[in-house]
């Protein structure tokens, strides 16, 4: 495809990120100032975005972003819900879970989570029974101890959940708790799919962005232009 046929790619992506909602071809023609007789030019540009997995569209249907993460996070797209994906080990002597601490700190930064998903073992779920605030409404996804101690197995089991969450939410991953191999797997996944990643220093209640908005912005800045 010739370069000239891609002149609207960035502006289309910018509009989707700016408004945070689905749009139809007719709306793009108007916003981009493309005459109806030249609508094939819009179609060519949409084809490019679809080929690179940035958008999804049904035939004659609305056009939407394929994944909300990481683009909506970087662009501060309004009205896009957040999701949290963490790890959790057994309770032992801890009174408050690392999940609860992380969600509270992120909440103080203005991030509110529609879904909180935690990967752990059945034993850990049992150990925290009655000790975690029901308001968190945690969605537990359990792996065996052997699985959580194998980097490749954690990656394999977590990837489907990542795809689901990235499509509908701005996803934040948290590698604070769990086994070391699971934490490494989270770091590899977050790096590969450009997902914001945090770690919390538990005693100090201090949050560190291992993959921050600024990091992602540097990687993706070529995608963002003002429409």
Image: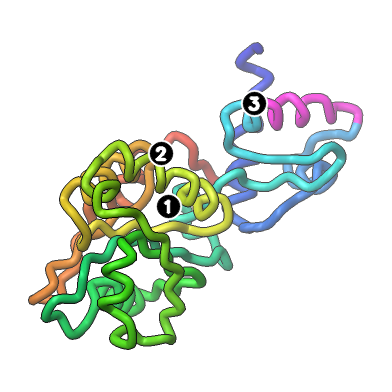
| Residue with the most extreme right position | 37
Where residue 214 appears, x then y in whole percent?
30, 50
Location of mark 2 (residue): 220
Above or below — where is 32 with respect to 114?
above
176 or 45, nearer to the observer: 176
Location of mark 1 (residue): 74
Which image quadrant: the C terminus?
Answer: top right
The disc at residue 48 is 3
Secondary element at image label 3: helix
Badge 1: residue crowd in 10 Å (few <14, some 14–19, many ≥20): many
Q: Residue at x 29, y 78 (%)?
A: 100
Where residue 67 appears, x then y in whole percent?
55, 47
Secondary element at image label 2: helix
Q: Are marks 1 and 2 in contact (CB under 8 Å)?
A: yes
Q: Are marks 3 and 2 in contact (CB under 8 Å)?
A: no
- Separation of marks 1 and 2 at Cα, in angstroms: 8 Å
- Separation of marks 3 and 2 at Cα, in angstroms: 17 Å
Q: Residue at x 73, y 45 (%)?
A: 63
First in sequence: mark 1 or mark 3? 3
- Separation of marks 1 and 3 at Cα, in angstroms: 21 Å
Where residue 90 appears, x then y in whole percent?
21, 70
């Amino acid at each position: 495809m010739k370069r000239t046929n891609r002149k609207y790619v960035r502006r289309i992506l910018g509009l989707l990120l700016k408004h945070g909602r689905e749009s139809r071809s007719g709306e793009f023609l108007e916003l981009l100032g493309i005459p109806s007789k030249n609508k094939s030019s819009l179609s060519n540009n949409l084809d490019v975005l679809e080929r690179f997995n940035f958008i999804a569209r049904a035939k004659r249907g609305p056009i939407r972003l394929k994944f909300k993460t990481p683009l909506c996070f970087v662009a501060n797209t309004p009205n896009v819900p957040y999701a949290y994906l963490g790890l959790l080990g057994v309770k032992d002597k801890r009174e408050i879970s690392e999940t609860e601490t992380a969600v509270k700190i992120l909440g103080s930064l203005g991030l509110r989570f529609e879904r909180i998903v935690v990967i752990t073992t059945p034993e850990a779920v049992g150990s925290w029974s009655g000790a975690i605030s029901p308001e968190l409404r945690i969605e537990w996804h359990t792996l065996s101890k052997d699985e959580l101690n194998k980097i490749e197995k954690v990656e394999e089991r977590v990837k489907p959940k990542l795809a689901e969450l990235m499509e509908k939410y701005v996803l934040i991953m948290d590698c604070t708790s769990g086994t070391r191999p699971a934490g490494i797997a989270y770091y590899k996944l977050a790096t590969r799919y450009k997902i914001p990643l945090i770690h919390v220093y538990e005693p100090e209640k201090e949050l560190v962005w291992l993959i921050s908005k600024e990091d992602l912005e540097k990687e993706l800045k070529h995608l963002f232009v003002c429409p």
